[in-house]
Image: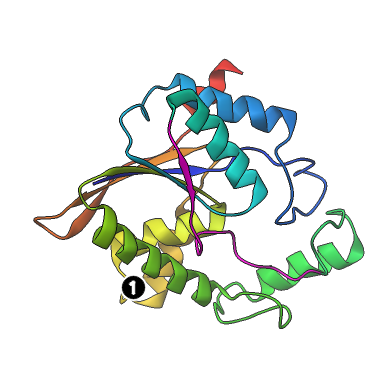
């Protein structure tokens, strides 16, 4: 099984406003998604799976249109849920700046939440494990394209490489070492006979050089 992992394209005002689940793609984001079609590497995929967040769905639909594929919305592969108090704020807002400082301060505590609405990193990891198991169970003989989000994708890649029973320090170090640009492409290959994953490449964004 080949698993192409793509971070969604740029959201509207993503550099200045804290994105919400409803944030659509910017005009640049639409061009980034269109550029993914030009790579042609997705032409033989069997499935396009996307999170239900708008910016991810719009990215998937643009790609699907270029390859005449259908898009399937999958629960559980969305970005880490954050507090509704943060969504839509200017990144220079006092509350937003305090929120970011608090995240940095508690970066080693993956059970920490800013408020009761939030999802911890530990909960994201559990979603990543569930999604990995679902892919193996239902798509092991297929090639799939997954459109998702930064934190979830880094958790998913780390889970596939180290497994969920690795020590916390190693897991966090690998997770923090992974960087994924908007529409960056990574490829995991699952070998059914060995029950193991190989990371074929990570965060290829060469297609953006044409923009």
Q: Residue at x 50, y 38 (%)?
A: 184
Q: Kindly identify which residue carries mark 1.
A: 164
Q: Residue at x 41, y 73 (%)?
A: 169
The C terminus sits in image quarter? top right
Q: Residue at x 31, y 77 (%)?
A: 165
Farthest-out residue, top: 210
33 on left or right of 155: right
Residue 156 percent across, percent down from the top left: 41, 59
158 on left or right of 22: left
Above or below, 184 relative to 193 = above
Residue 14 figure quarter = top right
Above or below, 67 relative to 50 = above
Q: Is residue 70 magenta?
A: yes
Residue 70 percent across, percent down from the top left: 45, 38
Residue 29 figure quarter = top right
- Total numbered badges shown on the rendered structure: 1
Residue 58 percent across, percent down from the top left: 62, 39
104 on left or right of 79: right
Above or below, 15 relative to 52 = above
Mark 1: few, some, or many residues within 10 Å (few <14, many ≥20)?
A: some
Q: Compare residues 26 and 207 and report the one nearer the observer.
A: 26
Q: Compare residues 14 and 105 and report the one nearer the observer.
A: 14
Q: Compare residues 50 and 84 and report the one nearer the observer.
A: 50
Q: Secondary structure at mark 1?
A: loop
Residue 33 percent across, percent down from the top left: 57, 30
Where are the magenta residues, as a range? 69-84
Farthest-out residue, left: 193
Q: Is residue 74 magenta?
A: yes
Above or below, 42 relative to 139 = above
Q: Residue at x 80, y 41 (%)?
A: 13
Q: Main secondary structure of the magenta part?
A: loop
Q: Compare residues 56 and 10 and report the one nearer the observer.
A: 56
């Amino acid at each position: 099984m080949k698993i192409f992992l793509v971070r969604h394209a740029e959201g509207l005002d993503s550099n200045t406003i804290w994105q919400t689940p409803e944030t659509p793609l910017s005009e640049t984001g639409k061009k980034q998604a269109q550029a993914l079609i030009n790579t042609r590497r997705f032409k033989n995929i069997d499935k396009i799976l996307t999170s239900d967040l708008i910016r991810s769905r719009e990215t998937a639909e643009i790609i699907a249109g270029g390859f005449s594929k259908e898009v399937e919305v999958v629960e559980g592969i969305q970005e880490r849920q954050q507090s509704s108090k943060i969504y839509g704020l200017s990144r220079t807002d006092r509350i937003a700046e305090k929120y970011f400082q608090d995240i940095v301060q508690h970066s080693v505590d993956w059970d920490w939440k800013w408020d009761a609405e939030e999802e911890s990193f530990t909960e994201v990891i559990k979603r990543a494990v569930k999604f990995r198991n679902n892919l193996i169970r239902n798509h092991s003989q297929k090639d799939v394209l997954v459109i998702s989000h930064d934190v979830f994708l880094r958790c998913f890649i780390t889970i596939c490489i180290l497994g969920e029973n690795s020590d916390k320090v190693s897991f966090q170090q690998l997770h923090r070492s992974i960087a994924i640009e908007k529409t960056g492409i990574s490829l995991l290959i699952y070998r059914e006979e060995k029950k193991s994953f190989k990371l074929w490449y990570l965060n290829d964004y060469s297609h953006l050089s044409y923009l």
